[in-house]
Image (cartoon, rainbow, N blue to C red):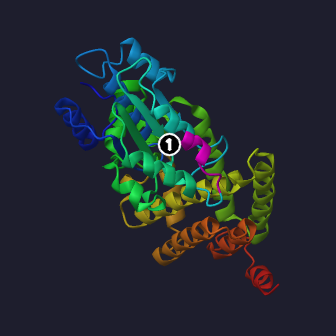
Amino acid sequence: MSFRLIGQERAVDLLQRSLKNGTHAHAYLFVGPAHVGKMALAINLAQALNCEDADAPCGQCPSCQRIASGIHADVQTIVLPEGDTAENESRTKISVDQIETLQHSANLPPFEGKYKVFIIDEADTLSIGAANRMLKTLEEPVARVVFILLTGNERRLPATVISRCQRVELLPLAAAKIEAALSKNWGIDPAKATLVARLSRGCPGWAVSAATNDNLLQQRTERLDDLMTIIGGDYETRFDYVARWAASFQKKDSEQSHPASNTGRRLMQERLDMWTDWWRDLLLVKTGAGDTATNIDRLPWLTDLARNHSLAQIRAVINSIQAAGNQLRQNANPQLVLEVLMLSLPETGKQGNKKAATQFMVN
């Protein structure tokens, strides 16, 4: 039996033992951050339940291959409408109609496999009505039916739903483990594997995408260049960036087919996460631990910047970025949040103007 997953040995061992002993649960809750491997593990479990080989999941039999391709009649995935993400407080939710369709299908016998498997991605987005119907389904298990709920935030799920599932937690992996997998399984250059592994925040799914798609790393380069311009710029430069971002993100939101998608706000949150990593790296360099930095390819830049900032300044910036992120999640006005953040950054540019900042705050 071979689950094809990077890391997560504890989760894999639990599932393997239950399958071997015939004691697998009728419902699972896979908990962990985005791209940590929840969907990959769910697909592996669906394959193991329906595999035609004794050493399941073999990954080679018609059943395993059809599940991997998403065309197996007995394995269904329920997801948010296109364009939505679980990070949005005002997101569209998984609807009652979607769960009612699931219930109807669950009451029918498997069509081509041994088990029917229903994977509910971002289960914390179940509407109240959908969650209630899901609870009824979990309370009355049907033979040869397995439900797998995936979530990055189980606190948003009703406790009654959680209690009906076997909880399996997937934790972020050590960068060294992701780096080794990238080199061994994908043949990624060692230097690139090291960088991508550190940037991944312990999530191998993102690491694989970044290592095999240069667009993600190019996007990172552009965003870091923006950050360096902001750090070294005056307040006029900083506020110009804020105005352009606000206009760009507002346009992205207006282009979405679902008004509640808040794509612009999500993209700004991703940018703030990158900024947090950068300033934490600066803190590491300042304290002599630069070899553990995330942005290892920018170490010379970090070293130069560290000379111009005190530890107190660096900690204050990190706190300000985190505060801005919290305010965005609470639906505060993005442009105002970012303008306040710009004012909190140390004035390192030669053209910095405290008088302008003071005037801005007064107005």
- Mark 1 residue type: Asp
For this orientation, the residue located farthest to the left is 21
Q: Quadrant of the N terminus?
A: top left
Q: Nearer the viewer, residue 321 or 223?
A: 321
Q: Nearer the viewer, residue 164 or 228?
A: 164
- Examine the structure image and report whether residue 98 is included in the region drawn in magenta: yes
Query: On screen, 63 above or below 283?
Result: above
Which residue lies at the image location 62% right of the left edge and 72% below the top edge? Answer: 345
Q: Quadrant of the C terminus?
A: bottom right
Can see residue 192? no
Query: On screen, 24 above or below 134?
Result: above
Which region is colored magenta? 91-100
- Density class for disc 1 (Cα within 10 Å; few <14, some 14-19, many ≥20) is many
Mark 1, secondary structure of its residue: loop
| Place of residue 227 in the rendered image (x, y in percent of width and height, measured from the top left) | 64, 57
Q: Nearer the viewer, residue 292 or 200?
A: 200
- The residue under label 1 is 121
Q: Nearer the viewer, residue 231 or 57?
A: 57
Query: On screen, 128 above or below 352?
Result: above
Quadrant in the picture for residue 332: bottom right
Can see residue 200? yes
| Place of residue 78 in the rendered image (x, y in percent of width and height, measured from the top left) | 54, 38
Quadrant in the picture for residue 293: bottom left
Q: Is residue 208 left or right of residue 345?
A: left
